[in-house]
Structure formats: C-alpha cells, structure tokens
Amino acid sequence: MKTEVIKVDPQFPDLKHIIHCAKVIRHGGLVIFPTETVYGIAADFSNPQAMKRLREVKCRTNDKPFSILVSHRGLISNYTSMTDPALYRLINKYWPGPLTIVVPTKDGQGTIGVRMPDNFIALKLVDEAQCTMAAPSANIEGKEPPKTCAEALRDLDGQVEIALDGGTAQIGRSSSVVDMTQGSPKVLREGIIIEADLIREAKKKTILFICTGNSCRSVMAEYLLKKKLQGRDDAQVFSAGTGVFIRSTASSETISVLREKGIDATAHLSQPANTLLLKQSDLIFCMTRAHRNQILEHVPSVEKRVYLLKEFANIAPSEENFDIPDPIGSSHESYQDCLKIIEEAVDKIERLI
C-alpha cells in the first residue's frame, strides 16, 4: 500500500478532502495531518483494531497511552468530570493551542490526555470525523516529531492510508503536557509554553461578578476590585451577565460613578456568563438570588463557589434582603448608593483573597 498524499491550502483547504479523510478515520483507517505543533496521525480512539494498528505503526509500547483532540473547549466535559477551576483556567488561557492536559477519565478508572489544536485543518478533521480522535505525533517512537508531511512520510509512507500536506507546522515542537490528576498541576513535558507560566496560570485566583446585563452592578464590582488588586499577578477578576446576548459597553451612569473613584471603565464590553467562565472561577459573586439560581441551574457543579455579594457588605443584622437592586434607569444618586454597597463588599473580599 502506498500512502495517498493530498496537498491542501493551510488557510483555505478544500473541505471535500478533509471530509474524505474523516470518512477514512471512521472506517478504521489512519491519516497523517498537520497541527500547529507537529504532524500527527489520526485514528478512531473507540476502534480497537484502528488503535492496535496505530500502536504498531508508531512502535509504541502498550503501557504508553494516546492523547485525543477536541474541536471546542467545552468538549473536555465529555471525557472528564473534573471540576477544578485550575483546569478551566488553563483551557481558557491556552486552547486552542500547544497544550495537552491530562485529566481523570469520566469513569474514574484512568487518565486521558486532551488537546484542542490551533490549526484549521486539524479542527475541521476532528469535527468531521464524528468520533473521538487519537492523535499522536506522526513519527516512530523515539524519533523526532515531524514538522512537515514529507518528514512524516520518511518512515510512515505505506503505513497509513492518507497524508494531508498542509505545509510546515507553525511551531515545529510537541505540545506542553500538564498532568491535572494529582491535586496540583505537574508539567510532564515542557513545550513552547514553559512550566513557570503553566503553574502560575493554574494557581491564579479567579473572581467573577454576575448581574443581568453586565453593564452596571457587576461592572462596578469588577473595576473596584481590579483597582484594589493592582500590582498583584496571583489573581484575575471578571464580570458577566446572565442575560447578555449582544456585547455592549457599560451604562453611562456606571462609567460616571466609577470615574468619580478615579476608575476608567469606558473600554468595558459585556459578556455572557458561559459555562467555561463559571467553571474557571474560584469565587462567584451574584447580585441577586435570582442570578444565583440561574447560575446553579446552568452549572450545578459550582454551587460551593457561589455567593451573594451583599452578604459581604455592611448591612443591619435584621436585614433579610441580600439582593442588590438594579439601578438601570435610575438617578445618579441611585448609582452612587449601589456603588457604595458594592464597594463595602469588595473591600472585604479583597482582604480575603
């Protein structure tokens, strides 16, 4: 058997070629393909015969596992039940990109390496394959990973059905690998992302403020806390809204009252409270009980990290209402009153971080 070589444009590949290769993978075949790191070999992870053949082609021993690729960040949850915010911080920071993350399998019986490549051909191939795709580097074990299709074919020509030639790999170096299964991150292989950066990102405290439109209350909280944490690189602060569908700036009154505190929020753009943002956060502060309920309905796993912001403000012992009302459409004084409550809570949170 001689390997069929198909040349494709790295930026604008003919999708019919990728669809053809995906079909070959689904039927148990092996396909060489480009990523931004090095060239890989694709096989159907759920097909025992394909995986046996992949191991033989790679000359890989049975005790060394294969990693898989995903085409979207959120698909990590298909392979692990892990809820550690550090996992999602690394995903949000480095995916798509040259980072493989080892996580516990969903059944808790083993581990699996997962990566989202930053290469259009690779991502489309994963999408079109419609199966879990194993993707080790396209070289015999112990040899240098190939940067080009020609390098991959030096040893593998005739061993795989198809090779997609998408030019030279942008990075030309294997991905960094970090193990998240031991309670704290452990770098197993350092690639272009260095160990110090991976550990620093994983250990950052992430604080998230939630309101409805992410244009008033949560913006005040985010920018107040960011000002208090200036100079610190061990924490990051975000805000989001449960009802954001179109990104917009902060309200004019919010910008005005923050400016009175010496804070410029004119560059703020609202964002939705999506699953990955919630999962990467160590502390989530909601403006109302309704927001808290919406968050927990959407992502129940973050329950122990969600609080009402007003619980941290200076309130009367007899007060039972822990909601911070939305000042939208109200007077400037109402915004100032809202900011005062939020600032009291943020002061206390800053001391806790």
Image (tube, rainbow, N blue to C red):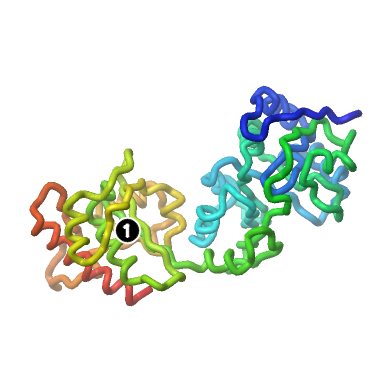
Locate residue 260: give its quadrant. bottom left
Q: Residue at x 75, y 29 (%)?
A: 7
Q: Position of residue 177 (x, y in %)?
A: 67, 59
Let me know if residue 230 appears in the view: yes
Let me know if residue 322 appears in the view: no
Q: Is residue 149 left or right of residue 271?
A: right
Q: Is residue 206 left or right of residue 116?
A: left
Q: Is residue 70 above or below residue 305?
A: above
**Mark 1 is on which residue type?**
Phe
Q: Position of residue 327 (x, y in %)?
A: 15, 53
Q: Residue furthest top?
A: 16
Q: Is residue 1 above or below residue 336?
A: above
At label 1, counting other C-alpha atoms closer than 10 Å, the crowd grade (few under 14, some 14-19, many 20 or more) is many
Q: Is residue 225 left or right of residue 324?
A: right
Q: Position of residue 275 (x, y in %)?
A: 43, 48
Q: Residue at x 87, y 44 (%)?
A: 56
Front position in the image: 38 or 68: 38
Q: Position of residue 301 (x, y in %)?
A: 44, 55
Residue named by callout 1: 209
Q: Residue at x 68, y 54 (%)?
A: 175
In which quadrant of the rendered image does the C terminus lie?
Answer: bottom left
In which quadrant of the rendered image does the N terminus lie?
Answer: top right
